[in-house]
Image (tube, rainbow, N blue to C red):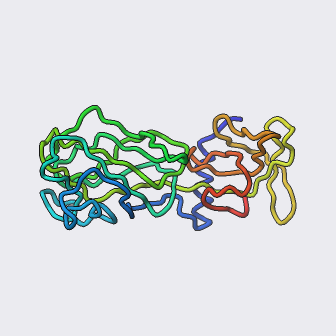
Amino acid sequence: MKYHAQYLIYVWIFLSFQGIQASIHLWASEVTKFSTQYNTGTYSAKQILGRPNVYPRYGDIGGTWTQAASERDRVHFIEVKFPRKIFITKVNIYETFHAGAVVKISAKDGQNQWVDIFNATHAQVIRESRKFSPQIKRIMFPVDELRIEVDCSASKHYVEIDAIEIVGGISFFVGGRNINRRKPGGDWRWIKHGSMTKIKYFAFGKCEPDGKEQSPQDCLLFHAGDGYTFHDSVCGKRVGGYICEA
């Protein structure tokens, strides 16, 4: 069925009127693993947590994750978690000393595997602070953990990162239900106050709906990872939120 860009406008207006925050900003809240740190204090891995406290200043300034003095000739990594899972649309990395060293960003999927969402061919040396917001690969799973890799060999010096932020959204179940799995594409109805109304407009994502008799997906979802297009989904699946009326 034909998809109209106007549909997205309706979705965002609807979410706004419902008081739902469509764009969520989260700061790293836990360091799960790292390859190196300068010390356990003001230049430790944990300094990367929360909002920036050095940016936009530039220089070798305490309050950032910094590598050990003897390990400035190689690629290092840090893995961080965020307070909740969201479908990410943007990653912001606040670099405050020898920016340009980020060469890879990976996101952990539902099977605890790292999936690359950004790769650089080589590191740069930028002698000013910056909020690095690279174009990331679109992924269809919610994320609450990232792995950032930095190549210190370009500058042969410390690479200091102040904070990591992710931006995105969550999916929402709406009051739509498939009442006939045997019918190709289903028979979708709006359910409101116990009554059913046939759905006359659809904006399903590519290859959706894909539920079947053997694996039913009878509930309707605004899927954040697919531009808030319609997806059929397993009813009761924990995906983020609910919009009771449509």
**Residue 180 shown left or right of residue 176 in the figure:** right
Measured from the top left, where is residue 45 in percent x and y? 27, 59
Picture layout, residue 113 above or below residue 48: above
117 versus 162 height, above or below: above
**The image quarter in which residue 231 lies:** top right
At x 62% / y 61%, what residue is drawn? 241
Pick the front one: 99 or 174? 99
Q: Is residue 98 left or right of residue 92?
A: left
Number of numbered tags placed on the structure image: 0
User: What residue is rendered at 75% in x and 51% in y?
Assistant: 219
Identify the residue at image location x=38%, y=41%: 135
Q: Position of residue 47 (x, y in %)?
A: 26, 64
* Quadrant, the C terminus: bottom right
* Residue plotted at (30% across, 59% down): 163
Q: Nearer the viewer, residue 230 or 4?
A: 230
Q: Relative to the observer, which residue lies in front, 231 or 62? A: 62
Which residue lies most toward the top here?
121
Image coordinates for residue 105, horizontal then vertical, percent: 36, 44
| Image quadrant containing the N terminus | top right
The spot of residue 32 in percent (x, y) is 38, 57
Q: In this rendering, is residue 50 above or below 181? A: below
